[in-house]
Amino acid sequence: MLENFRHDAPETIEMLSEYFRRGTLVPVFGAGFTVGETAQSGARVPSGTQLSTIMLEQLTQNGAGLSENDHATLNGYKFSDICEIYFDQNILPQELTKKTIHQYFYNVSLAPEKVSLIKDIDWKYIYTLNIDNAIERHSGYTPIYPYDANLSNKSRDFRPIYKLHGDVFYEVTHSSERLVFRKASYLESIETNRRMLEILEEDLLHKNILFIGCSLTDEDDIAFLVSGQRLPKDSMTRRIIFRSEAPGPLESSVLRRHGVNTVILIENGRYDQIYSLIQRAYSQSAEGDAELEKYAFQVKTLDTNSQTNQDFLIKGVSEVSEQSSKTAAVLPHYYGNRSKEKQVISNIQSSGAFVVLGPRVSGRTLTLRFIAKFFKDRKVFFIESGTELETHFINRLLGLNNSLIIFDSKTVDLELAKIIRNHDAKLKERKTSVLVTLDASEEYIIDALSPSKLVHVPVVEISRVFNKVETQLANQGLKAVRCPTFKGGKKLLDNLFFVYEALGQSSVIKRAPKEKELLQLLYIMSVKRKVDGDWSRFISSHLQKLDQLILTCSPYLEFEKVDRTEIANHSGYKVVCNSEAWLLAVISELYRSRGEAWCIDAIYNLVRDLPEDEKRLSIDLSLFDNLNFAFGGDSGGAGDLILNFYERLEVLRGSEPEFFVQKAKAYYSMYRHSDAVEQLSKRLKELAIAEVWANSENNSAAERNIRHTGVLISLRRAAECKFENLDFTIDAIRRTWAAIRSEHSNSDYVAKLADGGLKGSEYLKGLLHAISSSKVSSPMLLEVKDQLDFIKMRADSANHNE
């Protein structure tokens, strides 16, 4: 019996969702999936009819020995019969046929909704009738060709895409022709491809098959052959096809003969409804998922025992969570409320996505744990720092109803941010909130999370300096468990270092091995929150030595198994740190005891020796904010170390626009020698060249960074001259005006630049004060009067809106 379902009916979504839960839904992609998409050559992927026309035209123009009667006869041939003639090398040269295949099927790009369908959904394996390489090009699937009689069932375990009709890359790189287009190839394939067909037959009998873009009407189509395997009468599985109208009696008869028992109806031409339905069903399948439960929030609140609270304060979670679930978070007894808690709770109650932003070591994680435990009316999921989830798992997570999903720092990158943004409207419908924790250096991810340039995702900022009330509350808790108290007005990290010394931990820090490998390990960890097992080989080829270093630093450093829901690495483990304060204290000790040159050597060699496919890690390790955080450059730490590191790094990165942004930021923040004006001027010249490069590369993100960094450098240069050098002062005004004008929709940027929330704001205030108080006056300033008025107006307006 043939059952019809509407694409938007709740029972349709529930049916597919249940198959996703059971892992029994297998897709077969047909020609309709890639028809009309663009190949690398710029040509569109043709349909079967269009490809027949292309082949007939080439046979007319180039076919050897064909008469007019032959051409007339060919016009009545079916696709597979035309292919018989077209691929006959006695009639058409192989160079022409291979060039045509390359032109129409090589390196095909897919529309975003199709990319999402194959990349964001956890299909264990895929079948395709298409010869183009679109699916594997946009995903991590490994192509398996229909030329191997020894194919094993175990091939299913390696995320394969079974290419039933062959592959364009094989075709254009081999002299033989293996495409399953011709009738002869088709018949040959039934034998040589028997093992792959048997695997497909097994799935047709025991799994639910989803035919996407398949007609199942061509008798010379392999899917036509295999789908003829009749289902047992007692079978509960489905073979599902999409149609724009209910099949009539004749088509229903054909479909039933080929095992199709389910038709999902979409509106005519609305293929997006297919993709939307599958995505919704996949998202809904997350309800009650055992893998998701691993991230369900559990919290263990410590009692007043002073030892366990001290252990947590200096050693981290490993020392105090042995009696609770491995996934349980710990909240110390001494935790005191933060002033931004009400604002965070308000955003959670509004549903949708929002950001909690703050510097490293600002107490955000404990604040979020404290808030999360009060949401009893929602299912709460907490993704801990250093967890890198697969995109398809994120898709399922975001499909939950009435939930709170908290991503702690370093768990959301640009790609995941875009996925969250694309789910935002549906999150609100489902009454689900997504809280994304970002470091202050990751503000660029806010743009990716925001619905548009005019509408920014809500942001709550948490300071690393406790206010007076927060300090009092924290100290009450610390006293209750006999821990040293915090000093008011100090950064949290400074207070944690003080606690280390007061609790006698300085000797532990001094005992840390003085090895370059340890510095490299800790530096990667300070940037990425963890070290993948695969990254270990970049630190040392002697992994036993590295293992020993980690064991020596236990319990501060630990090995942790990588969960299957995380992005896979070959080693299956990662190294995590249980105390960021310890980590930074040891880096500081290594710098103090070994010196600047030794540290530069260690970090430079680490970056230099990274392979090309680790470009993202290499860039992250070279960012000024990360170096500054690890070595404390802006708080009397290793400023010269960072500056000299960039001078040395220029050999490797001197052709990249972003390198000069990072170098300029370092000089802006740390250079304090008498030739500061000269050095800042050099940085501006470098940025000017970098901006030309970025523009020619259409790198708008780099252009924006260059523009903003140029403002900071120019403002400081003018301030170094007490704004008395009019050329420098006018340059600073013009750059500031251009930056603010380019951020016309970002009032938050303007407000921060005006009120002290951004670096450079004090210099801007000094400039405006020098002019308004007439300390600096000259007819030359009339050149920039309009720009100056614009800066004042936008700053006043932004502050008023705040």
Image (cartoon, rainbow, N blue to C red):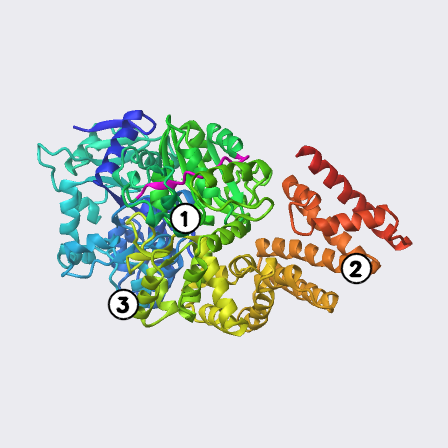
Q: Quadrant of residue 789?
A: top right
Looking at the rendered structure, the secondary structure element under dot 2 is helix
Nearest to N terminus: mark 3 or mark 1: 3
Mark 3, Cα crowd under 10 Å, few <14 / some 14-19 / many 20+, is few
Q: Which mark is residue 385?
A: 1
Q: Quadrant of the N terminus?
A: top left
Mark 2, Cα crowd under 10 Å, few <14 / some 14-19 / many 20+, is many
Pair 3/2: label in front = 2
In the image, residue 450 lies at what x, y percent?
53, 40
Pair 2/1: label in front = 1
Q: Which mark is residue 728?
A: 2
Label 1 amino acid? Ser
Separation of marks 2 and 1 at Cα, in angstroms = 44 Å
Q: Which mark is residue 90?
A: 3
Magenta-drawn segment: 327-340
Q: Residue furthest left?
A: 233
Pair 3/1: label in front = 1
Nearest to N terminus: mark 3 or mark 2: 3
Residue drawn at the location 54% of the way across and 68% of the way down: 653
